[in-house]
Image (spheres, rainbow, N blue to C red):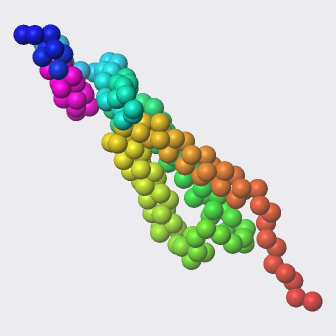
Amino acid sequence: MPQETEELLKVRMIPLLALATLLGASKVGAQGPATETQTPLPVVVPRAGKDQTKERIQVHRFWDKKNDWLFAGVGAARAFDYFSTLNLRRRGDQEILVTNDLVDNHAAFAVVEAAGTGVSIGASYLFHRRGHHKLERWTSIVHFGLATTGAVRNYCLKTAHPKSAP
């Protein structure tokens, strides 16, 4: 087989190998299925540009250890925001981002907070599928930071004292 044909075959097989790796089907055989501790395969992907140069990128699973911790952090930050907002309402302050009726309905407000976590994970997944792995991680990092900042702000506000009648 000529060397050019062999190289072309290798380049065309790389996306299939990457897909098999993502689906967990790599290196199945006498040793058993692949474990998550194995390092991901580098994949050669053509990038748009003047000279059509090829760059190396790392393929990783969506539910890897880093994303697990980031998603847990987003969930924890949303829970922190939930409790800080309830505390804010108990002290007599007004919620500014959603209606007070929503916050006072604890079950509905918990669903909103959980949905926010789900939307964050979904956005990360869309970035992952499109190959924007930095944006995939930064979505969770920014969401974690904003939710935590909002919760801390809620606890730092002074208690609203009702005005007494003269």
Q: Is residue 65 above or below residue 140?
A: above
Percent of width and height locating residue 150: 65, 55
**Is 20 colored magenta in this rendering?**
yes
| Side (left or right) of 107 relative to 87 | left
Q: Residue at x 54, y 73 (%)?
A: 102
Q: Residue at x 42, y 36 (%)?
A: 133
Occupied quadrant, residue 115: bottom left
- Of residue 118 and residue 163, the one placed in the foreground of this image is 118
Q: Is residue 79 above or below residue 104?
A: above
- Of residue 8 and residue 163, the one placed in the foreground of this image is 8
Residue range corresponding to the magenta coloring: 9-24
Which residue appears farthest toward the front when viewing the image?
Answer: 50
Residue 161 visible in this rendered orientation of the protein: yes
Q: Residue at x 47, y 41 (%)?
A: 135
Q: Residue at x 10, y 10 (%)?
A: 2
Percent of width and height locating residue 79: 54, 53
**Is 73 colored magenta in this rendering?**
no
| Side (left or right) of 97 relative to 50 | right
- Of residue 19 and residue 26, the one placed in the foreground of this image is 19
- The quarter of the image holding the N terminus is top left
